[in-house]
Amino acid sequence: MAASSTAPARVRFAPSPTGFLHLGGLRTALFDWLYARHTGGQFILRIEDTDQKRFNPDSLNDLMRSLRWLGLAWDEGPDIGGPHAPYVQSERRALYRQYADWLVEQGKAYHCYTSEAELEELRAKGLPYDRRHRALTAEQRAAFAEEGRASVIRFAAPLTGTTTVHDAIRGNITVENASIADPVLLKSDGLPTYHLAVVVDDRLMEITHVLRGEEWIPSAPLHQLLFEAFAWPAPIFVHLPVILDPSGKGKMSKRKTVVDGREFSPFVRDYITGGYLPDAMFNFLTNMGWSFDAEQEIFTREEAIARFDVTDISPKATALPFTKLDWMNGLYIRQMEPARLQEELAPYVAADLGLDVANLRTDRRLAELTPLIQERIKVLTEATALIDWAFVPASQILYPDPTQLIGKKLTAAESLHVLETGAAVIASIEPFAAPALEAAFRSQAETMQIKVGSFLAPFRVAITGRTVSPPLFESMHVLGREETLARLANATQTLRAYATAAV
Ligand code: GLU
């Protein structure tokens, strides 16, 4: 679909399943996906789980659910396989070992027997690994092995010179090779470190572009050196800007933050349950570090795909404007076909009110209420509080404050009269529809010389139990004639009891 002169890119999202996916991770996946789609290439999901200590079994489901929710389907991945399966690093361990051994044979890596206690001594002095086993003789190695010492494989980084990594949006990043202190490639448990696994997999999976958070910049020169050691061309690196806390001061925290009195979470799962639309989140996150153009901030997925290019990503860190997300979500809600919005609302309303979601999807009341609240909600979770009155029996509409049933500048007796007059209109009006009801009520108010607002207020409270509700006559229609009359009867009784007691 993507019309582009760029060659098809192979782009991977390579999360470590250590916790719930946060918005920064989702943005990385989104940019990966956009670039793959823009070039007509592939988006690959790879699970980097070689750090078994930090593995969190819940995070894989959370991750896949989050990506699916946003509509980021992967072309190759752990669940669907692909030409380079498996896509979970812990299932590829034999492979990494081969590559580590090959580097050892080539003299580009070596076995290191330094014990944990010895390393701790160095750390305590603030020193990096001192390459003490870089030049062991075969006899020395044998002696360590004899002692029963475990070994790791370390990279023999060049001792002099510099290494330059080219980042597509940041330019050249150069470091002194001497600062790369022979990092571990293969751990004593036989599992690779991130550095070895990422390089081997990016090569074997034919990754052309590596998009990842800027926290990986310090690792990039080592990766570059590893690509060179294997005599492989390196992919194009794009280090994405970090997402800042709304204050703009630090990296976005792993906890909830309060902005303008509202709580915002860094975790994608909270937006799924929080009533956000995937299309709105997609649009919002695409704007975080990339812009469609100088003016337009609302665009479709297709428009973004057609225009997205990695070189247009800004390296500047941005704070997430959470309130804008709410605004954008409200905008997407207002743009939706009511029938689709009903489908989206159904699960939330069903969960809140203990109703059957399948029934709600086709429920007449929800179908009528949806366009009435469409302008009034920013997130789907706000709907229930506006419409719950329509889904309970009349007996559950309570009037703890009967004075709310009294119209402005009216007495209790006058309001009772208003309610009774209205009930008579409702009982006989044909058709029982909002325009006819409105005309009849307005003319009744005029006849009784009561301001329309004062005349209508008691009815709103009577049928919804609230002083604020969706439009009154449409609300009556949602309930139907019988149910409306039942509620008016209850309200009238409550107000009469109040008026009697007050005398
Ligand atoms: N596994 C790394 C992470 O979770 C990915 C780094 C990369 O994309 O190279 O952040």
Image (cartoon, rainbow, N blue to C red):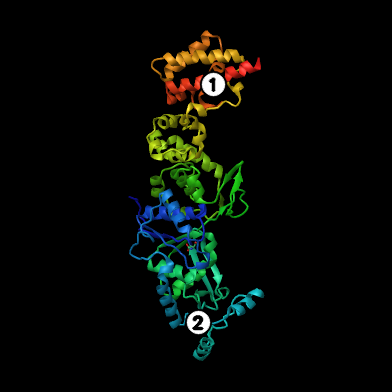
| Amino acid type at image mark 2 | His
Residue drawn 51% across the image and 69% down it: 221
Q: Is residue 470 above or below residue 340?
A: above
Q: Is residue 228 above or below residue 265?
A: below
Q: Is residue 278 above or below residue 113?
A: above
Q: Crowdedness of circle 1 by 10 Å Cα count: few (<14), some, many (20+)?
A: many
Kindly report the distance in space between the C-alpha atoms of the residues bearing marks 1 and 2.
85 Å
Return the x and y of residue 61 as percentages of the image width and height.
44, 56
Query: In front here: 108 or 429?
Result: 429
- The residue identified by callout 1 is 491
Return the x and y of residue 374 as percentages of the image width and height.
46, 33
Look at the numbered discs 1 and 2 and tell me whether their residues touch, using CB distance below 8 Å. no
Residue 407 seen in render: no
Residue drawn 50% across the image and 12% down it: 421
Quarter of the C terminus within the rendering: top right
| Amino acid type at image mark 1 | Ala
Q: Is residue 28 above or below residue 111?
A: above
Element marked by disc 2: strand
Query: In front here: 343 or 319?
Result: 343
1 or 2: mark nearer the eye? 1
- The residue identified by callout 2 is 111
Residue 276 seen in render: yes
Q: Earlier in the sequence, mark 1 or mark 2?
A: 2
